[in-house]
Amino acid sequence: MHPVELTKAFRLLNHGPTSIITSAHDGKVNIMAAAWVCALDFNPPKVTIVIDSKTYTRELMEAEGTFAINLPCVKQIEMVKKVGSISGRDFPGTDKFAEYGIDTFAAQKISAPLVNDCVAWLECKIIPEPHNQNTYDLFIAEVVAAHADERVFSDGHWHFDGHGALRTIHHIAGGVFYATGEEC
């Protein structure tokens, strides 16, 4: 993992990958898959994310004011399907990380854990916009730290050639995913 210049953080999301959102508050953690994550601004870098009001991830995000965007890759597809199909509320006494054996490491600037083996990570601080959050489930956040696996992202650009298992994944609909394709 190497740092990504914050002015280039938007490039981590520009190609529309499926994301794993992690959140933490008061010793509780959660993880979920999300498809509606988008770069919004360059400097300071901002993102938008839609998180349903019924999710446990959102409860923790709102309580803490932060969350992480983790970009999983092809080799993590089964984990993505698992964490995206069941709520963290359904794990009394444990959590999805423990249940599915998901390894994490500490973020630099927020409390949410980062998922090992992803290809990029964005640490985000929520910019409170209650109307958008309550009406549209839409959150705006500032990216306070960004990191990437330098095997597939360096000098501000993705380069997946020769790294099939490290290609990002894209949810189409109905549980169908595609891997990022070849450069044209």
Image: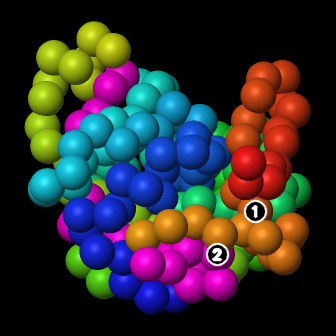
Q: Quadrant of residue 143?
A: bottom left
Asked whether residue 180 is in view, the answer is: no
Closer-to-camera residue (19/91): 19
Q: Nearer the viewer, residue 137 or 173?
A: 173
Considering the numbered disc 1 on the image, is that residue within a helix, a strand or a loop?
Answer: loop
For image coordinates 76% across by 28% down, the residue present is 172
Across and down, in percent, residue 24 comes to: 39, 63
Image mark for residue 60? none
User: Which region is colored magenta?
Assistant: 137-155
Instruction: Find disc 1 in the rendering and name its residue.
Output: 167
Q: Is residue 154 visible?
A: yes
The residue most toward the top is 135
Q: Nearer the viewer, residue 117 or 51?
A: 117
Predominant secondary structure in magenta? strand
Place of residue 152 in the rendered image (x, y in percent of width and height, measured from the top left): 64, 75
Q: Mark 2 or mark 1: which comes first in sequence?
A: 2
> What residue is shown with label 2?
152
Q: Is residue 168 left or right of residue 158?
A: right
Residue 154 magenta: yes
- The three-letter amino acid code for the residue at tag 1 is Arg
Could you say where residue 22 lies in the image, as x and y percent from the top left?
48, 59
**Residue type of the residue flagged with mark 2:** Val
